[in-house]
Image (cartoon, rainbow, N blue to C red):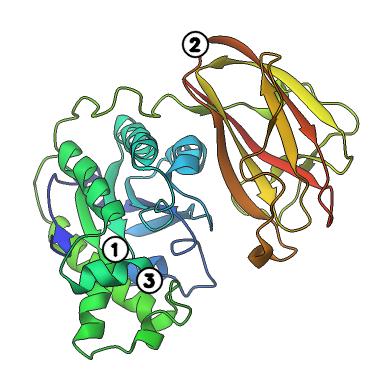
Amino acid sequence: MEVINRRGGLPRFRKAIENGRLRLGFIGGSITEFAEYRGWTESFVGGLMQLIPDVAISVRNAGVGGTGSSYGAFRVQRDIISKNCDLVFVEFAVNDRGMEKEYRMRCREGLIRKLIKADCDVVIVYTYCKEMYEPMMKGEVPDTIAEYEELAKHYGLSSVWMGKYAFDEYRAGLMRFEEWLPDGLHPQERGSYSYGQSVLKFIEPEIKSDAPRAPFSGPLKEDNWENCEMIPFDLIKWQKPWRLRDNSRFHIRNEYLDTSAAGASLKFDFEGTGISLVLMKGVMAACFKYRIDGGEWIDEPGGSAVEMWQGNNDWFKFMTLCEGLENTKHTFEIEVGANPKGSRCCIEMIGVLK
């Protein structure tokens, strides 16, 4: 597998350039998340501005640290498609590593299909983490990247292996590892420049290319997540001790349901085959239990264990609580508990699989 894997064309990207206004979208984890102008997206956009100086460029960075394709499939409509992005870069291979293969393939395919159906040009990009070192030293493709490539080939999407571009520079002595990834994962200025350069090498020929977009293929997995959707909080009948908050420190979405009362419960109906939640989790966060259709209570995935590395800060934690239900009306209930550190429960998203 090469750094640049060119497949279908980017007709909407080229049309936007002709019209003088280009809307770029980026969706991924912390490596893509806006990081005080140090990330690879800044390096790439800066270089692209030199290539198309007469085009007004808008940037929508929808990177969210610690999240993968699962959350991406739910929020892509809100965070990318609704912003009318012409060209979208998807970066989730690193954060998807901990997911079971079949599960992450359903998430990824749903995300991709939503973007293509919205007429976005799509490019998949792959970064690097330390678990990739041994296979890459052997000339192998890490599993999480190889599986994303299955989807890229099926849908005729180009991909850029940014991590390999930087890895090759490191192996050639052109960049020290500590320049590339000071913490072993997140590139700063030098590493971000390398990542951005690899994408610029891909994009420059596309500016004048007349290659058509690949035909929209049928799904590889019929149970992919293209029909998953968020439940608007307005449809959830919350009451004391819950409240709906809107705090500006959450840069992608400000609204979330919140309570600090141990024993607080929430109950609502949904129609679909499964349900997922995104909570703000840290050492001060509450634990919870839940049940479907009045069944047995189930402890949250991972139980009451907390991720001590998170400190007192909140992090987005995505969890799918059930799948494979009959596609009909169901009832969901959640009850908040407390851990030795705190009882705060912040629900950022309620999502339904269909």
Q: Residue at x 38, y 45 (%)?
A: 85
| SS label for mark 1 | loop
| Circle on res. 112 | none
Residue 4 x/y as whole percent? 16, 61
Q: Residue at x 83, y 57 (%)?
A: 341
How far separated are the C-alphas under marks 3 and 2? Answer: 41 Å
Circle 3 packing at 10 Å, graded few (<14), some (14-19), many (20+), is few
Contact (CB < 8 A) between labels 1 and 2?
Answer: no
Counting the numbered discs, the total is: 3
Give the side of residue 243 with respect to residue 142, left or right. Answer: right
* Closest to the observer, 154 or 135: 135
The earlier-in-sequence mark between 1 and 3 is 1
| SS label for mark 2 | loop
Contact (CB < 8 A) between labels 1 and 3?
Answer: no
The earlier-in-sequence mark between 1 and 2 is 1
One can see residue 122 in this view: yes
Question: Compared with residue 323, is residue 257 higher up or lower down, i.e. above or below?
Answer: below
Question: Compared with residue 332, is residue 153 higher up or lower down, i.e. above or below?
Answer: below
Residue 244 x/y as whole percent? 79, 37
Give the side of residue 248 with respect to residue 44, left or right. Answer: right
Marks 1, 3: nearer the viewer? 3
Residue 298 x/y as whole percent? 68, 30
| Circle on res. 130 | 3
| Circle on res. 326 | 2
How far separated are the C-alphas under marks 1 and 3? Answer: 40 Å
Q: Which residue is mark 1?
A: 54
How far separated are the C-alphas under marks 1 and 2? Answer: 53 Å
Identity, as a three-letter code, of the amino acid under mark 1: Asp
Identity, as a three-letter code, of the amino acid under mark 2: Glu
Identity, as a three-letter code, of the amino acid under mark 3: Lys
